[in-house]
Amino acid sequence: MASGQLYRRGRTWHAVIYTGRSIDGKPERVRFTTRQTSKAEARKILTTELYRYDKKSGVGDSCRLDFLLEEWTRSIESRIANEKTAHDYIFGATQIVRDIIGSGIFETRDLQPTNLLSIVNSYSLSTNTINKRIARLKNIVDYAVSNRFIATNPVRDFKYLRLVPVKHRRHLSDEEIAMLLAVSPVEFRRIWQFFLLTGLRASELTNLRWQNIDLKKRVIRVTPTDKFTVKTATGIRSIPLHAKIELPDRVGEYVFCNQNKVAHRPDVLIKAFKRCMFNALCRLRGLPYGKRLSKTELADNYEKIEAVNAELKNLDIHCLRYTFCTGLIRSGADVKTVQQLMGHKSPVVTLKIYAQFTTANAESAVLNLPYLND
């Protein structure tokens, strides 16, 4: 079992850990600085490091949850390049581990299904969010098993909550696309058109620089920068520049900027899309839009406006990317090509979209079989 001691050099506390004896009989030691001026804080760091050395020396029957969360977090930060994805993973894991510790469970040996069920049932969150937290907990304990901190995962067989079937994301029709572009201001019309002809994610478009567009070769290159990381490794890709794309005038480093020559933020585009899409749906249904409606106009069109608002809940800015994907499928593109252009990490994601889109065409596909149709 490792032992350790603290010593102060100047204003900072340092530590030494004795991990055992080498072949020549001399003690093996590891020295490090705690970077703390408080002895109490330095003692906490030394205690954690001693625990880590003991855990690495062999498989035990249990492990502290706070220690596991810290170790797992480090591995996530080193393995996942996208900051937002890593943050989402760590946030969900931290929340459920803190809730477990808050209920009086500190060790993996005490992780029992009944205890976890009471914690899960106390959440007032969506089923999908709760299941993500359960998955993070399983990830953490799996990490402990793979690093030989413990022998088995006590939460491996803990059941996820039953998901309520969700509606498939829908793409925009040709008529809706035409109307969206017709009612949008020039600045946003170019952006919606760019989404529809490239399939970029919102973060990819807002971080697109002029150096990413090769006008000679007519290609757009999605690459990480010092201020932007792609969602996955396959997110680094090249997309042909469609002839109908309307590029704005070059006024700064970024392709799409606001009036202050600052790149648009994703949240600004999301709000603008909702507003433009609402106007497009209203115009398609012959409803007044683009102004404050009078009480009479609201009363006369109440049900239709509510129907538009209900439909708008199933449409967000990502539906432009989804429309691009289904457009590729309609044009006869194969799965691998669609996957590459979309920057999907796995073809499974692409195949799900294929399945969703082609289900509607199943009947006509069967009726149009080339044989026995006489």
Image (tube, rainbow, N blue to C red):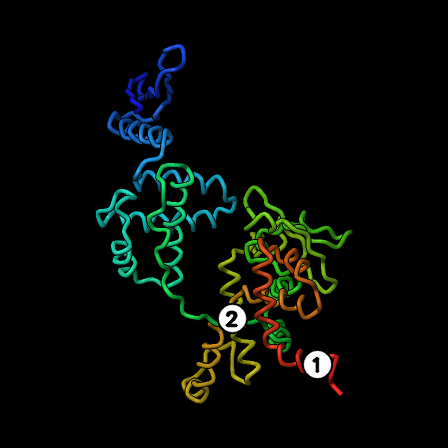
The tag earlier along the polypeptide, 1 or 2, is 2
Point 54% across, 44% down: residue: 227
> The N terminus is located in which quarter?
top left
The x and y percentages for residue 178 are 64, 75
107 over 290 or under it: above or below: above
Relative to residue 368, is residue 257 depicted above or below?
A: above
The kind of residue tagged 1 is Asn
Residue under label 2: 168
In-front residue for pair 229/343: 343
Q: Neighbour class for label 2 at 10 Å: few (<14), some, many (≥20)? A: few
**Residue that carries the numbered disc 1 in the rendered image:** 368
- Picture layout, residue 51 above or below residue 288: above
Mark whose residue sits in front, 1 or 2: 1
Q: Secondary structure at mark 2?
A: loop
Where on the picture, by quarter, is residue 300? bottom left
Q: Which mark is residue 326?
A: none
